Structure formats: structure tokens, C-alpha cells
Amino acid sequence: MTFDPSPSSVAVVTVCTPARAGHLRSQRRALTAHLPGAHHVVVLPERPGSAQLAAELAADGADPLEVPAGRDLPVARCRNTGGDRAVEAGADLVIFLDVDCIPGPELGSRYAELPPDSVGMGPVTYLPEGAGAPDPAELAALTDPHAARPFPEQGLRRLEADEFGMFWSLSFALRADLWKRLRTDFGAFDEQYTGYGAEDTDFGRRLLYRRVPVVLVAGAHAYHRWHPVSDPPVEHLEDLLRNGAHYAERWGEWPAPGWFDQFERMGLVRRLGDGWEAVPARRNAEDGRPGNEG
């Protein structure tokens, strides 16, 4: 079943760096198969190779949008910029897809049934390494949604106020009018978050705090291609500390407490009041030798 875009225009927004170009091409193959005619806004934070990727995308019919970026990827700003471009291009339905996510055959048609006042999230299947880049026609047979987010078998399920932690930015959608309202009301994604972590949990929490319905959408399947990950994500510790402190300033608690507990057991962070700080490197500053540990 493919999505017929004629009843309303649809745009897909993806944030991508050149390192994920292969996954982006997989996503675009499935968009051609399952959402023909969709306007694809690809936001490219400035990185080596971004200009070449932008040229490739433009030649392939996408709408590349290059965004200046420093050392820390401005993911929140990229999403906001992409959503704004989608609305400016005339989209009625805006679908945000992580670059690692391949849209399933019914993703567009299920999201098209969203109530105009609601933000919808679809289930995501994490593909094994051996799945590689599956043919779009093979995706349905691979369906095995992430168990941490129990989706309804049919229709929609509205999240309760205390379920903000279930929001994810891998795959979600909303109407253009609602996006414009969110941008006016609170800016949508908080652009003070940079790098990895917390910006999507914060976004989901602010939606529910403002009584914007967030619904789980049955059947709007996406398929996340495999890539190496760390658990906990130690390579993003600096980002998580910075973003976690900003989140706690707003909400009075830190996000991802399980990760910080693991970081503490690894000797990477320590308690600072109600929050966390990095443990200084255990090295003698004067002679460069490892310092005493105890």
C-alpha cells in the first residue's frame, strides 16, 4: 500500500551528515517506493563533504538545505529549520524521519490520518546488522517493533502526561498548521540543546505540558538500519552533561538517569548537588604521570 499524496501535500524532513549518506540513500529509495511525490527536505549541518552531498541530492530531486554548524551538531536547530522549509514549500503533513530510518509501505497513509491537533509517532523496528539495506518491498516482512514503546494494534493511543519519556524523534509527524503553532508558542525544539541527547525528550515533555496531544500511531512503521552504538554512549558524555544540565534547569530533574548511573560506576561522572559533573582526568598535572586513585 503506497501513500497517495494528492489529498494533501506531504514533506519528509531528514537531518544528515556525509557520514550517513549511505543510509540516506536507502531512505530515499523507500520514499520513492512508498511515498511517491513527497517533498524531501534534507538538512545538512556544515561538515566536510556536505556541499557535494547537497549537489547530489539536488540532482536527485530532493531539497537540500545547508546549515552552518560548529563542533557540536545543532540537531534541534536543524529540525526546526527543516520543518520551517517544509511548511514554506506548501506541505500540509510534515514527517520527521531520522536518517537511519527507512519508511515502511504504510507510514505515509497512517500518518495522514492524524487529527490536526496531534503529534503522532510511529513504531520503529531496529534491523540487525545482517539486514544491510533491504529492498523496500522486503521491509514489511522484517517488522519487529522496539518493545520499549508498546503501540496499539489498530488506530491511535494518546500518551498520558507522565509518558513524555516515550517521545522519540526517529519518526514523528504533524500537520503544518500545528508546526507553525508550536514554533510560535515555544519555538518547537529548544536550540540551546546541541550535540547528542535530551532535545527530543524535552520537546515531548513540553508538548504534553502544554496539553498538545501526542499519539502512538499503529502501522506507521519505520525500519532503523544498524550502525555501531555504545551503551552507555560514552563518546557523547560531554554533550549529555551539557544538555542534561539545561534539561534539569527547566524540569528539575536530569534525563537518562540510567546512563548517568552507569557513567558513575565507570568512574566518569560524580554527583554535584542534584546533578552530575565529569570526573577530572586522574593524571598528575605536573609530571604527566597517572595520579593516585585513592
Image: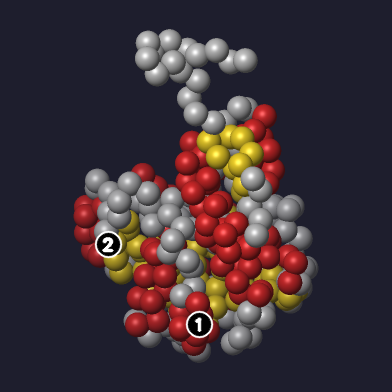
Mark 1 is surrounded, within 10 Å at the Cα level, by few (under 14), some (14 to 19) or many (20 or more) other residues, namely few
Instruction: Indicate whether 177 appears above or below 224.
Output: below
Q: Nearer the viewer, residue 223 or 171?
A: 171
x and y percentages locating residue 66 in the rendered image: 27, 62
Instruction: Indicate whether 61 appears above or below 142.
Output: below
Q: Determine the residue positioned at 74% across, 52% down.
A: 147
**Is 271 displayed left or right of 163 in the figure?**
left
Helix, strand or loop status at disc 2: strand
Q: Determine the residue positioned at 47% across, 66% down.
A: 190
x and y percentages locating residue 98 in the rendered image: 49, 58
Q: Earlier in the sequence, mark 2 or mark 1?
A: 2
The label shown at residue 185 is 1
Q: Determine the residue positioned at 47% across, 46% down.
A: 239
Q: Nearer the viewer, residue 96 or 288?
A: 288
x and y percentages locating residue 92 in the rendered image: 47, 85
Q: Are marks 2 and 1 in contact (CB under 8 Å)?
A: no
Among the 4 quarters of the image, the one containing residue 115: bottom right
Q: Determine the residue positioned at 66% across, 56% down.
A: 253
**Is 217 displayed left or right of 98 in the figure?**
right
Q: Is residue 72 visible?
A: yes
Where does the N terminus fall, quadrant-wise?
bottom right
Q: Amino acid at mark 2?
A: Glu
Q: Amino acid at mark 1?
A: Asp
x and y percentages locating residue 73 in the rendered image: 38, 52
Q: CA distance from mark 2 to mark 1?
A: 26 Å
Q: Which residue is mark 2?
A: 66
**Is 42 displayed left or right of 224 in the figure?**
left
Helix, strand or loop status at disc 1: helix
Mark 2 is surrounded, within 10 Å at the Cα level, by few (under 14), some (14 to 19) or many (20 or more) other residues, namely some
